[in-house]
Each structure stands twice: as C-alpha cells, then as structure tokens.
Amino acid sequence: MVPVKKNEVYKIEISGMTHEGQGVGRIDNFTVFVDGPIKGEEVEIKIIEVKKNYAVGKLVKILKASPDRVEPLCKVYNRCGGCSLQHMSYDATLKFKTDLVTENIRRIGGLQGVVVHDTIGMDNPFNYRNKAQFPVGIQRGELVVGFYAKRSHDIVNSHMCLIQHSDCDKAKLIVKRFLEENKISIYDETTGKGLVRHIMTRVGFKTGEMMVVLVINGNTLPKQDLLVKRLTAEMPQIKSIVLNINTANTNVILGSKNIVLFGEENITDYIGNFKFKISPLSFYQVNPVQTELLYNKALEYAGLTGEETVFDLYCGIGTISLFLSQKAKKVYGVEVVEDAIRDAQENAKLNGVDNVEFIVGEAEKIIPDMYDKGIRADVVVVDPPRKGCDGVVLDTLVNMSPERIVYVSCNPATLARDMAFLSERGYEVLEVQPVDMFPWSSHVECVTLMTNVKNK
Ligand SMILES: C[S@@+](CC[C@H](N)C(=O)[O-])C[C@H]1O[C@@H](n2cnc3c(N)ncnc32)[C@H](O)[C@@H]1O
C-alpha cells in the first residue's frame, strides 16, 4: 500500500540528496523526491505525483533550514533549468560533490578506503562559461531570449546570467534589440515555421576574441548588414559573426552549414600554452579555467618521464593528448567523431606537436586492433562519455597491463563501476580528485589515478 496521497501535505525530514541535487525524504519508509530542500532540513511538502515505488513532492515551506542554505543570487533561479544548487553556499556545493563521489565509490564500486580529495572549486565561481546557447521564442506576444525552464521548453527570459562571461549577455541583448526593432520572424518549435532559433556566443578567455552565431531556419537574415554593423561597433572584440543553418524540425541546436557574415569562421583561444581554433561546431570545454586545472592534474597523475607511450582514449579534439605530449615519447589519441579527429590533427599542427597520432574509430574496436598489432601503452588516460568505458576497452587494457591508468570522468556512478572492474583485475585506486567544472550545477568531474599492482 502506498502511504501517500496526491495533493496531500506532509512534513518530512530530508535525509539525503540525489546526484541531481533533489532532496530525498521518507514517509512511512516510502521514498519522496523534492526539488529545493537540502539534506538535514525539515520541510512541508505537497505530493504532486505518486508512482509505485516513489512519490514526487513540491516544496511548500521550510520548517527548519540548513545552515548551508543561502538566498540564490540569480533572479530567475527558481524557474531556469541552468543551475540547480544556487540555494546552497558554494562551499556546501563542493562538499555535496565530494560526498557524491565518495558515496558512489563505496556503494556502486564496493571499494572501501579510497582517498577522495576535496573537490577543487573556483576562486570566482561566476562568469565561468565561455559558451552560451540562448533559445529565442515568442511567448505571450513578447520576444524572449534566455534559457529553457527546468524539464521544459518554455523559455525563461534572462537579461543577465551569472555563470556566463558577461560579453555573452551583452551580445545577446544587442541581437535581441535588433530582432525586435526589425521585426525579424522568430522560429516556432511547434509549427516548425519562423526564422531565428538560437543565439550562440563563444568567448576566448585568454584572447578575448568573441564569436556570435545566429541559428536560423533559412538561408539569409533580413538586414544582416545592419546587425553586423551594430555588433562590431558596440563590441570590437567580436571577430566572427556566423549564420548557422538549421532547417530540421529537431531539438539539436546547430545545423551543419555555416555562412560567415563577418570575420573568420573561427576564433582562437588557449588552454595552458596550447592554442586552439574554435569554429561554431567544434567541441571545446566550456570552463577554460577549470579545464586547465583538470588537464594538469591528469598530466601529474600520468607521471611521465619522456620515455612513455601513452594512449588518450575518447580524446575529443585532442586537448588532453596535447597536454600529455609535453612529457611523453608518443601519444595516440582515439576518438569516434571524425570532425573532432580532424580538429585534433589541426590543433597538433597549429602547436607544432609531432609526437601525437590521432586515430578515428570506436575505442572498443581500435584498442584491441592496436593490441593485436603489438602496440602497447605504458600509461593510459581515458575520458569516456557519461556511460563510462566499454567492457572490451577495459578488458584489453587489463591484458595490455599499462603501469598507470588515469581515468577522467564526468559521471561518478560509471567511474565507480569501472574502478571496481579494474581493481578486481590488478589495479589499485590510489586517489581521486574531483574538480568543479560546472559551479552551481550538480555535475562533478573527477580525475582518478590507478596503478598496476598485478606483479607486485
Ligand atoms: C567526455 S568527452 C572527452 C573529450 C576530451 N577528452 C576533452 O577533454 O575535451 C568523450 C568523448 O568520447 C567520444 N566517444 C564516445 N564514444 C566513443 C567510442 N566508443 N570510442 C571513441 N570515442 C568515443 C565522444 O565523441 C567525446 O568526444
């Protein structure tokens, strides 16, 4: 028997938090999830959804507040789907992330005593993002430009986003004014009609160079010369203005065709000493400050002397490979997306790096192939997508038996699973360093050092 009823109000104590930052409590041992409360708080909630094994509640009143609770700085925090932890102090969010990693390693990985360091936060956890993608729409007859609301495609109008580089908001407002004044047609997701879909902005934190992209459902933008004139006059740091053509009825933001309206199709930026060309479609880490820190940690854990052959699996545009190349004899980067490998090769050339080789394909096919050809790694770095490493990749690594495996992960649950697999097969987990790449969100990135103890 389910002990809760829809629309009834209950008092509960929040005993934990999910990996997404939702509060979790129990009513007669029945689990209830609630957006908003913090672990340790006593709250009044109204049940809004009842399922067989759990219910969802809406926060009505906080009866006993946590000492970690703060007033969110963002005015649209409660509606916007961008941030999820702004009701906690920054230090408390870092502790939440460390605890999440520790708990996953213990519960999913079944590993005791693993050293999990405190999450490395940012000195200034604001304005850290170098890329913004603002959906554009008409709501109640008004032009709105902002972010999607939580679990919906309603647009929350936003004038100032605290986590974006401030130039992104400035450019967005210039474009918004242009769209309003010139009555440019706006895309409607439900009918697939209308022109302007998204405004995307990118900023090179080290170079200051900026790119503005208008994603449109068509091939030209009326009065595009006027827009270029306004943007470049008000923001001389803009080096690239691009129309991205997306005529498909899809949730995917960018189409594959770009038309350059001003400047180049790329801007440049640096991570550490390495220079990168960034086009509208290239993948590039969104928090450049923490990325540098994360990559340096991966390089430190790799413990290279200059003699090693290193694999960088799931290498994207080869950023980690370039960092590793500084201290390795040879680096092989493996990545499934062809365009990313092309970018990686260009980035290596751009930086005069000649001891890296990039291979396109699925790691689970490429790694066994390399193993069969007798290519061995002394150190392997993996940075897989959220689902973690493929079993074939892990099996092959165990057979290859590198001295160290450095595991970069954006999902503590799959990290813990893969760690358990490797630790049963001769790898000891020495330490885990969580890094806060996305302040105020519930995401956490980790770098883990595992060492080969098979023959010791
Ligand atoms: C978390 S990203 C890592 C990117 C890169 N290391 C960086 O720091 O920018 C994961 C990458 O794995 C790639 N990927 C996904 N499945 C793959 C597979 N089966 N084999 C190789 N690469 C894969 C994705 O395209 C993506 O670039």
Image: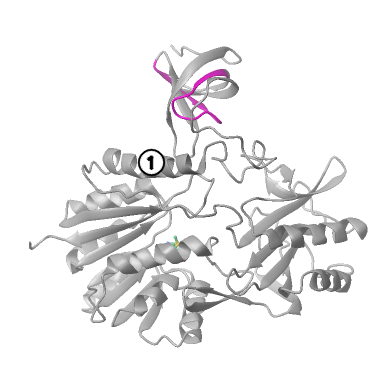
State the count of labels.
1
* Outermost right residue: 182
Q: Position of residue 189 (x, y in %)?
A: 74, 49
Q: Which residue corresponds to the image point at 50% horizontal and 63% vertical from the top-left?
A: 289
Task: Judge whether 275 appears above or below 385 on screen.
Answer: below
**Which residue range is magenta in the image?**
29-45
Name the amino acid, label 1: Leu
Front residue (pair 303, 196): 303
The residue wearing badge 1 is 100
Q: Is residue 179 left or right of residue 264?
A: right
**Is residue 227 in view?**
yes
Q: Which residue corresponds to the image point at 62% horizontal and 43% vertical from the top-left?
A: 81
Quarter of the picture for ligand 1?
bottom left
Q: Position of residue 126 (x, y in %)?
A: 59, 53
Is 250 one of the magenta-colored residues?
no
Q: Position of residue 349 (x, y in %)?
A: 48, 86
Front residue (pair 57, 435): 435
Q: Position of residue 216 (x, y in %)?
A: 76, 63
Q: Quadrant of the N terminus?
A: top left
Front residue (pair 224, 322): 322
Label 1, residues with CA under 10 Å away: few <14, some 14-19, many ≥20 = many
Q: Quadrant of residue 156?
A: top right
